[in-house]
């Protein structure tokens, strides 16, 4: 299977500066801690430009999450392309991608999980549906990779792998112990080996 990468709208130079500034600030400081004045100042634009380009802070948060997710999916696609055969190694490649990606790009954990922790009622607004969509993508990806590898219960396996993955990314953000994705990969391999007739 190929990794689906959502098409995002083109950005004007001003909008790009706003999004870049907001992305760095939201991830480093948190969504609620960063106001539009701070973002506009960091981007070198007026608040009017920010609102003209994105409409609201919430829309800017969604754009931040979407663009980070698109970058991750592009990176994940390149890693999966290096392991094209549908077997256990291709499933584990998701963890390999996370290992190499997280240290540089996600030292504070998952931006979607962090955003979800900050919002109030998930029924309100557009942030929660975006977070849910990103997590549904991961679950569906694991299920499809397991299905292609010949797993008898790909959906059940995908739930276990997603649990390992999500636990690891939260542990990255918390810094509870070093190299959580490496451990999650080992555990994923232990889960997969009994049900897939492949070995490393």
Image (cartoon, rainbow, N blue to C red):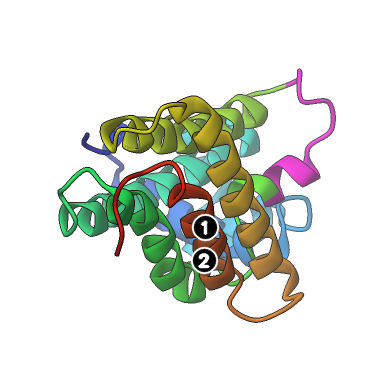
> Which residue is more in the foreground, 113 or 146?
146
Residue 129 horizontal/vertical position (percent)? 60, 24
Disc number at residue 93? none
Residue 196 horizontal/vertical position (percent)? 36, 43
At x 50%, y 46%, the residue is: 64
The mark total stands at 2
At x 21%, y 56%, the residue is: 78
> Which residue is more in the foreground, 66 or 98?
98
Is disc 2 surrounded by few (<14), some (14 to 19) or many (20+) residues within 10 Å? some
> Which residue is more in the foreground, 51 or 97?
97
Is disc 1 surrounded by few (<14), some (14 to 19) or many (20+) residues within 10 Å? few
Query: Which of the two marks, 1 or 2, is nearer to us in this view?
Result: 1
Q: Is residue 34 left or right of residue 96?
A: right
At x 84%, y 33%, the residue is: 120
Considering only vertical position in the picture, is 56 above or below 102?
above
Q: Give the magenta-colored segment's residue range.
A: 114-124
Residue 93 horizontal/vertical position (percent)? 33, 57
Residue 58 horizontal/vertical position (percent)? 63, 34
Q: Quadrant of residue 131?
A: top right
Considering only vertical position in the picture, is 10 above or below 39?
above
> Which residue is more in the foreground, 125 or 195?
195
Q: Is residue 1 left or right of residue 56?
A: left
Mark 1 lies on residue: 190
Q: Quadrant of residue 163?
A: top right
| Element under disc 1 | helix
User: Residue reaching furthest top?
Assistant: 123
Q: Is residue 119 left or right of residue 172?
A: right
| Element under disc 2 | helix
Q: Is residue 116 magenta?
A: yes
Q: Is residue 80 magenta?
A: no
Mark 2 lies on residue: 186
């Amino acid at each position: 299977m190929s990794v689906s990468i959502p098409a995002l709208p083109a950005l004007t130079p001003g909008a790009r500066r706003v999004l870049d500034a907001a992305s760095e600030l939201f991830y480093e400081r948190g969504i609620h801690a960063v106001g539009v004045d701070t973002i506009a100042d960091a981007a070198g634009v007026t608040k009017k430009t920010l609102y003209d380009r994105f409409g609201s802070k919430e829309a800017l948060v969604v754009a931040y999450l979407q663009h980070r997710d698109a970058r991750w999916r592009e990176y994940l696609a390149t890693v999966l392309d290096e392991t094209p055969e549908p077997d256990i190694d291709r499933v584990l490649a998701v963890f390999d991608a996370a290992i190499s990606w997280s240290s540089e790009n996600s030292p504070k954990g998952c931006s979607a999980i962090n955003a979800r922790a900050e919002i109030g009622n998930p029924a309100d607004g557009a942030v929660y549906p975006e977070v849910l969509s990103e997590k549904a993508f991961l679950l569906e990806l694991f299920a499809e990779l397991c299905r292609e590898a010949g797993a008898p219960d790909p959906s059940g396996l995908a739930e276990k792998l997603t649990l390992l993955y999500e636990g690891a990314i939260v542990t990255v953000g918390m810094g509870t112990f070093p190299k959580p994705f490496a451990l999650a990969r080992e555990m994923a391999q232990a889960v997969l080996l009994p049900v897939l007739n492949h070995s490393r």
